[in-house]
Image (spheres, rainbow, N blue to C red):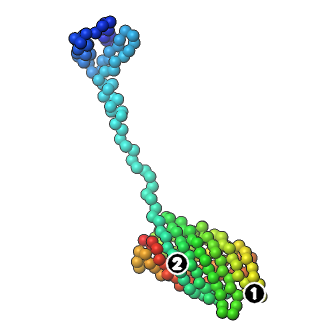
C-alpha cells in the first residue's frame, strides 16, 4: 500500500507530478491520503465500467395469443317451433365467450326466447368448433296453456363451422336452455362473419 504525499498547497507542477506518480504505479495500486481518502486504481474504474454494462435478460414473456370475433345469424328448427338466433362470440386462445339471443315461435302457438351470456366456453385453437354455457334470461309462454312466464336458465351452445374465407364461414349451431319452466333446444344453419383466422 502506497501513501501519496499531500502538501498543504499544490502548484500546477505539483499536481502534474502527483498524477505521474499515481499512474506510474501498478494497475492494481491505490493511493491513500493521510485523511483516509482512497483513490481507486485503474482496475477499479475498469470494473465499474464492466459492471455498468450488463447483458439484457432474455425475453421470457409468453407469446400473445391471437384473438377472434364473429357474428352468427341463423334459422332452423326448435322444440317449440321455428327457431332463429343471433349471437356474438369472442375467442382468446381456446376460451370462448358468447352473447346470444334465441327465439322460437309457431304461427298459432306459444313463443319462447332468451337473452344470455355464455362465459364458460372452450374452442379449437382456430375457430371452427366450440362448446359454451353460462346464464340466460328466459321469457315466453308455456306450451301447455300459453301461460306467460319469465325465469333464469342455463344456456348451452355447440358451434361447428367451416371458414373458406378469413372473414366468413357457414356451419351448424346447436342450442339449448335448461330451466324450471320451459326448457327448449334446437338446431340452426348459421352464417358467420368476422375475424375467423
**Residue drawn at x 28%, y 9% as measured from the top left:** 10
State the residue lying farthest toward the bottom. Answer: 108
Give coordinates of residue 173: x percent, y percent. Answer: 55, 80
User: Can residue 59 be spotted in the picture?
Assistant: yes
**Residue drawn at x 29%, y 23% as measured from the top left:** 42
Q: Nearer the viewer, residue 171 or 111?
A: 111
Give coordinates of residue 185: x percent, y percent. Answer: 64, 82
Disc on res. 56? none
User: Is residue 52 shown left or right of residue 153?
Assistant: left
Disc on res. 72? 2
| Secondary structure of residue under mark 2 | strand
**Residue drawn at x 69%, y 93% as measured from the top left:** 108
User: Is residue 16 shown left or right of residue 75?
Assistant: left
**Residue drawn at x 52%, y 82% as measured from the top left:** 190
Tell me the quarter of the picture where residue 100 sits: bottom right
In the figure, 185 relative to 46: above or below? below
Tell me the quarter of the picture where residue 132 sits: bottom right
Q: Nearer the viewer, residue 142 or 10?
A: 10
In the figure, 164 relative to 27: above or below? below
Q: Nearer the viewer, residue 85 or 13?
A: 13
For label 1, the residue is 146
State the residue lying farthest toward the top. Answer: 8
In the figure, 16 relative to 154: above or below? above
| Secondary structure of residue under mark 1 | loop
Location of the N terminus by quadrant is top left
Which sits earlier in the primary sequence, circle 2 or circle 1? 2
User: Is residue 196 shown left or right of residue 21?
Assistant: right
Total marks shown come to 2
Amino acid at each position: 500500500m502506497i501513501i501519496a504525499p499531500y502538501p498543504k498547497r499544490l502548484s500546477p507542477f505539483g499536481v502534474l507530478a502527483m498524477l505521474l506518480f499515481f499512474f506510474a504505479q501498478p494497475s492494481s495500486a491505490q493511493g491513500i491520503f493521510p485523511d483516509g481518502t482512497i483513490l481507486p486504481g485503474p482496475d477499479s474504474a475498469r470494473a465499474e465500467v464492466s459492471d455498468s454494462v450488463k447483458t439484457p435478460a432474455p425475453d421470457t414473456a409468453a407469446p400473445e395469443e391471437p384473438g377472434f370475433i364473429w357474428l352468427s345469424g341463423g334459422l332452423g328448427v326448435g322444440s317449440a317451433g321455428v327457431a332463429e338466433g343471433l349471437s356474438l362470440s369472442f375467442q382468446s386462445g381456446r376460451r370462448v365467450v358468447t352473447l346470444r339471443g334465441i327465439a322460437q315461435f309457431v304461427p298459432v302457438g306459444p313463443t319462447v326466447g332468451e337473452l344470455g351470456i355464455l362465459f364458460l366456453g372452450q374452442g379449437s385453437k382456430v375457430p371452427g368448433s366450440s362448446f359454451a354455457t353460462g346464464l340466460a334470461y328466459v321469457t315466453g309462454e308455456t306450451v301447455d296453456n300459453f301461460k306467460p312466464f319469465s325465469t333464469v336458465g342455463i344456456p348451452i351452445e355447440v358451434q361447428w363451422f367451416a371458414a373458406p374465407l378469413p372473414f366468413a364461414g357457414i356451419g351448424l349451431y346447436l342450442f339449448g336452455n335448461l330451466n324450471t319452466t320451459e326448457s327448449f333446444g334446437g338446431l340452426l344453419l348459421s352464417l358467420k362473419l368476422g375475424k375467423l383466422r
